[in-house]
Image (cartoon, coloured by chain):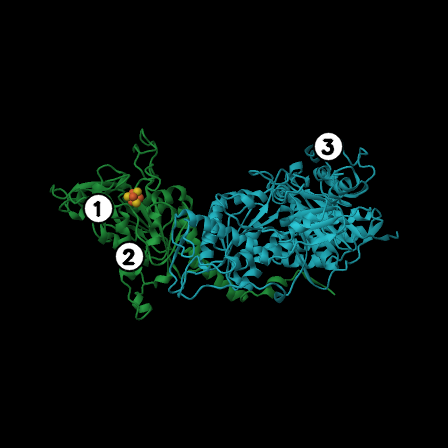
Chain colours: A cyan, B green
Amino acid sequence: MAKTVQVVDDVTVRFAGDSGDGMQLTGSQFTDTTAIVGNDLSTLPDFPAEIRAPAGSLSGVSGFQLHFSSSDIQTPGDSPDVLVAMNPAALKVNLKDIKKNATIIVNTNAFDAKNLRLANYETNPLEDGSLAGYNVIQVELNKLTMAALEGIDLSVKDKDKCKNFFALGIMYWMYNRPIEITLKWLETKFKKKPEILEANQKALQAGYNYGDTTEIFTTRYDVKPAKLPKGVYRNVSGNEAAALGFITASLKSGLPLFLGSYPITPASEILQELSKYKDFGVITFQAEDEISGICSAIGASYSGSLAITSTSGPGLSLKMEAAGLAVMTELPVVIIDVQRGGPSTGLPTKTEQADLMQAMYGRHGEAPVVVLAAQSPADCFYMSIEAAKIALEHMIPVILLTDGYLAFGSEPLKIPKLEELPGIKINFRKDPEGFHPYQRDENFVRPWAIPGTPGLEHRIGGLEKKDVFGNISYEPANHEIMTNNRKNKVEKVADFIPDLVVEGEQESELLILTWGSTYGATKEAIRNAKLKGYKTAHAHLKYINPFPKNIGTVLNKFKKIMIPELNLGQMAMIIKSRFLKDVIQFNKVQGQPFKVAEIENKIIEVLGGSNGK
Amino acid sequence: MENKIDELVPGIKYSAKDFASDVDVKWCPGCGDYSILAQVQRTSPDFGERKENIVWVSGIGCSSRFPYYMNTFGFHSIHGRAAAIATGVKLANPKLQVWVATGDGDMLSIGGNHFIHACRKNINLKILMFNNRIYGLTKGQYSPTSEKGKVTKSSPFGTVDWPFNAIKLADSAGATFIARSLDRDPKHLQEMITRASKHIGMAFIEVYQNCPIFNDGAFAALTEKDSKPDNVVILEHGKPLLFGANKNKGIKLDGLNPVIIDLNDGKHSISDCWVHDEFDDNPTRGFILARFSDLPGFPTPIGVFRQFKKATYDGDYYSQIAHVKKQKGSGTYEKLMFTSNTWEVN
Ligand code: SF4
């Protein structure tokens, strides 16, 4: 039977199954292949906090969403066009998210009485008509996989585990992608287990052939390559990009990289990733607790390393006392906070932007630090370098905010040449002549005098310092001078950061001001709203403390300012209090990023409705 | 590590003076900390390190002012965190000799977690813990080493908590040089400090220190001339455990029970006594020794309880780096970024 090929611009697929079904792996294989085929893409895994919830249960469903396109995209997509559901629970959990006429590929073998009960289905949705309107494709994944693997010397259980590759094969066929990239990946992965290798490869091939030969698949889709700027690319998650950024900063500065860290979701991958790079001399100290994570980093910074500590919200709280010490001793240290839903243990695998106030004001005393935020997974690479550069060149702690959405999400990073990246100047004090530990240069920066330097033996600590000389001082006037020095030093950083850029319609009455991971959804929403005739300006903050110098001028140009953020209005509060501006808040705290449509609808409401008029 | 400084750096001969900073020492008059500082300054020339390679890290408390008075690199940090900060200092630059000055509250209470983990990892640090069994800087609350029932400002009816035995704790946690000394025994303290400076691995010295303001005489029985002989047993490797005015008492080991014997009773002789072996790799005897200070009637041991060789965290970390570099070559930006999963857009 002839199969039709339909060219589409943009597709969102979601793979969903039990946490043991290998959905993250399947998703990332589809991603790698899609990247190499040349589409622009953005991904987001969604997994439960439990490592292995009971098989078949609703709480055990793990998902991986991929948005790919022949044009430039910024988000993993609002609603999937295709759902691959490995069992009833996966169908139930994901059905509410997918498009009304979406394609659903289901593993019918998993729809038995037990799994239906575990998913709280009273009747079988494949039979009761509740999926009318969807394009349901029923595949006997278990049975077909078993048949394809006949003759391979493996247990039934091991063979059954290959069914995700069968499903992947079907998807490769449907979206006209080559299977060779995954075949090759399997070869390296299972080099030492030839039976498993053969089984997975066969399952993948069989899935592909199944799409090609059976009559249930009538249409293939073609998504042409995107017109991306020339260059070499790789796909990176935010956590991976941050790790690469820190190593790059270490190469740029010539300083060894030290990470002091305690495992915490969703930041642990930074620790894991960096621990691989011993050939770069990276030291990853897995500390006994969060406090030791930052304290060891402060010690390493004192010794002359590029020192980092990675964490998430609860860990940031534990680090705050030591962050105060870093402020007082004016030592460079980067704290990367991968925000998650809080407070307390909250929603550890879900995203939120609710640590902004903590990063800005969460310390005891007057203790300003530099606060930065990355806007996309690939941007985590650049912002990690930037955080390191500011910390090192200004002898100051820097908090870099990312979040679970950026950390786990991925997108292509166009790999820059090393020379294209900004240099990082390190100036260890060597000369004992006239050395004073708290003598500042024109940017309020004190000298970095590391142990091992003859003649520079000196003492620092958490007690207030005498201006210039650095010995302990309890003088009232001196404390005020030093407090202002520390504040001025942070403010001076504004001379070294780029201006706030306004994109979109400069003449609009509405400016959408974003920070962090809301960038992508906002950008797409503005593009969509424009197609409907609603014109909006957009400015995005990557530098939060200090703000870019022109922010006041930018804010004054617009009649209305809207701030969408994944908290209850923290940036809005800062903007309101600092610039005495009225702000339209748009908040969401569901552990999920904004959907493009949500922001788009809000724009239409603000510009088209009576709101604000 | 065994080198004297003049062998390392011909021409440099330090004296105690070289290690005194120009900061006025501000402990209370009569505080035991003065003696500890003096003994450290006296022994520092024998550490075998140039002074710019020595770092003193401290937490918070009276003892933690220590780094200000040493003319080396110094870092007075925050309460309890000295071991964690010192770990970072050492790991980032293993050539440094890193010392921690701390107190019983700083190290065993708020800093307890960092302490046990630094011991467990056998990081190459030297921890000098001033134990005065009280909180001095906050003016007189009981500490984690205060004896049970102690009346203090925060325990007007006496404490109901049991104290830590720091030696037991350090040994169980994995320290590889475990010693105790007294502020009032300068010679002994000097010996302990010098030996700790030569040890490779986590060296822990508990120094009993008198706080004349808030806990005066806490260790008087161990330090006063007339009572010291009966209350202190000096641990020396290969020597029997003897104490008393004329070394007339000994300790023998009856199974796992220590027993005090009278060497003049005609029934016992010196050959019955327990002979101290500080290199014993079985911790059992060290543990029994450590318990003496908790046992009524038993003398408190001072000296090296145990010391042994074990791979250090920093040593192994850098060997691992060297090994990986040898296998893979040193990292470069190209190797970092242009991995097998890249693709090109033309
Ligand atoms: S309070 Fe006690 S320990 Fe502290 S300095 Fe005074 S005497 Fe020494």
Provide residue B313's location: percent of width, then percent of height.
43, 55
Front residue (pair A272, B37):
B37
Q: Are marks 3 and 1 in contact (CB under 8 Å)?
A: no
Q: Does residue B288 appear in the picture of this structure?
A: no
Provide residue B77's location: percent of width, then percent of height.
41, 49
- Residue A16 sits in quarter: top right
Mark 3 surroundings: few (<14), some (14-19) or many (≥20) residues within 10 A: some
Front residue (pair A106, B114):
B114
Q: Are marks 1 and 2 in contact (CB under 8 Å)?
A: no
Please report the residue visible at 71 percent of the width from the left and 59 percent of the height from the top.
A181
Q: Residue furthest front?
A: A477
Q: Are marks 3 and 1 on the same chain?
A: no
Pointer 1 chain: B
**C-alpha span from label 1 to label 2:** 26 Å
Label of residue A121 in the image = 3
Which residue type does callout 2 highlight?
Answer: Gln
Q: Nearer the viewer, mark 1 or mark 2?
A: 2
**C-alpha span from label 3 to label 1:** 76 Å
- Of labels 1 and 2, earlier in sequence is 2
Which residue type does callout 3 highlight?
Answer: Tyr
* Residue that badge 1 annotates: B233
Q: Secondary structure at mark 3?
A: loop
**C-alpha span from label 2 to label 3:** 77 Å
Q: Nearer the viewer, mark 2 or mark 3?
A: 2
* Residue that badge 2 annotates: B41
Provide residue A164's location: percent of width, then percent of height.
70, 48
